[in-house]
Amino acid sequence: MGLPAVLHNRDFDLYWSGVVLSQIGTRGTVAANLYQVYDLTGSVAQTGLVGAAQAVALLILSPLGGALADRYDRRRLLQWAQLASLVVALGLATVTLAGDAKPWHVILCALLTTAAATFDQPARQALIPALVPREQLGQAIALLNPSREIAVLIGPALAGLLIAANGPGLMYALDVVTYAALIVVLAVLRVPALTPSAEARRSVLASIAEGARYVRRRPLIWKLMSLDVAATVFSAYRVVLPALAIDVLHVGPSGYGLLSSAPSAGALLATYTVFRVVGRSQRLGRVLLVSTALYGVSAILLVQSPLFVLTLLAALFLGAFDAMATTIRHAAVQIETPDELRGRVQAFYQMSSRGGPALGDVMVGSIAALVGPVAALSLGALVTLAVAAGFASRPNVVREYKGVALREDDADRAPPEDEDSRAAPVDEQVTQPRRGG
């Protein structure tokens, strides 16, 4: 079996490799941040402050990051953002290895790293269409999402081992190296320059407003954002993992690393299925809703399982369903967005896709301080289930979404449009011929 066509692009392959390496460091650092704060304080609520810091940076700076991604060289913007994150990681590694780290050091560094990422992520996502032909964009997204899961699989597991060996400072030092690697990769990419001549003459606020109007006028995009929030805020599982590993399951830092990595292992195991479904299914909206509901079920099983092995199994399923839902959402937003608006739209979208988990850490962490981690996540996951059921119970643009697998000659067989789908005319949607496996 030959490689997918998308992997025959030299620049995409380089970029893909660099992003995976950088994300290993980033995801390991996030896991180390959460563990370190819980280890220093013994409080799930204070552990949730890591998410609060991330949420503040995301919600305030994301629109600005998106506007800049549509105005300036996306590769250079990425390099500067990576350099800023490198400096922050170096500072945290220094104070931690010296034994002087306090909870506020970790929380402040989480805020600063996320602030840099608000400029990084929109540019990173908006750069992808410049690396592959348009007809391969769906494949590129379907590969990048499981690649992220490779990072989330290796990063937290590696963090657990390094924490057990000599504390979280080693993880932060490794993060510095991975940031440097992506900076080098970006320097050798051959990327066509974005020429936003008209955009550059407009004010940044006007650019942000234009992106917001585009999102508001595309029901598919903002409803996908609301579904994303329902899953990531109310089923925010990562904030309870330190308490689950240390106080409930009694498996220590190594067990915490395995537990943090298990969802990504599940996502990787589901990669082939996700790739085939995204490339071929004409019922992606329904697949998305079922996956979101099962994500909520898996979150409940994650905290209700009495044995570590059953908890790991639930985490595997959670990651698999999350991978399916995330890939469908991300690909839909990319395909629905013109290149000149892609940075801004991605910025608004990351307010839900990345801001949701951060806000969820705060909410679930606060509730866990009152009722315990098991009850807190179980109650939140029930909300995720209810929202998915609400979308599935009546015709709407999300449920009826068909994706890029819909061929133009199938348009006559499409179901009647509801009010939402009429707001986004079919002739504005990008379609492509069905591709073989």
Image (cartoon, rainbow, N blue to C red):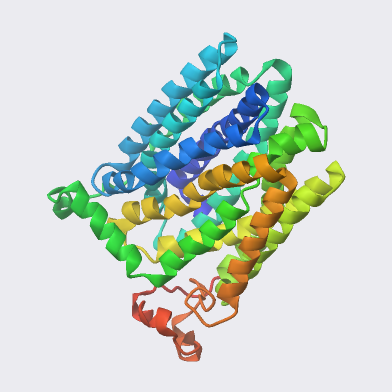
Q: What residue lies at 87% left-to-right and 44% top-to-bottom? A: 307
Q: What residue lies at 37% left-to-right and 83% top-to-bottom? A: 422
Query: Above or below — where is 432 with respect to 300?
Result: below
Most foreground residue, 302 or 90? 302
Q: What residue lies at 44% left-to-right and 85% top-to-bottom? A: 418
Residue 135 in view (yes/no): no
Residue 223 in view (yes/no): yes
Most foreground residue, 144 or 250? 250
Quadrant for the C terminus, please: bottom right
Query: Above or below — where is 315 with respect to 229?
Result: above
Q: What residue lies at 65% left-to-right and 31% top-to-bottom? A: 43
Most foreground residue, 335 or 373? 373
Quadrant for the N terminus, please: bottom right
Query: Above or below — where is 7 with respect to 368?
Result: below
> Residue 200 location in percent, x, y?
16, 48
> Residue 431 location in percent, x, y?
43, 74
> Residue 398 location in percent, x, y?
50, 73
In this image, 413 relative to 1: left or right?
A: left
What is the quadrant of residue 324 in the picture? bottom right
In this image, 67 relative to 330: left or right?
A: left
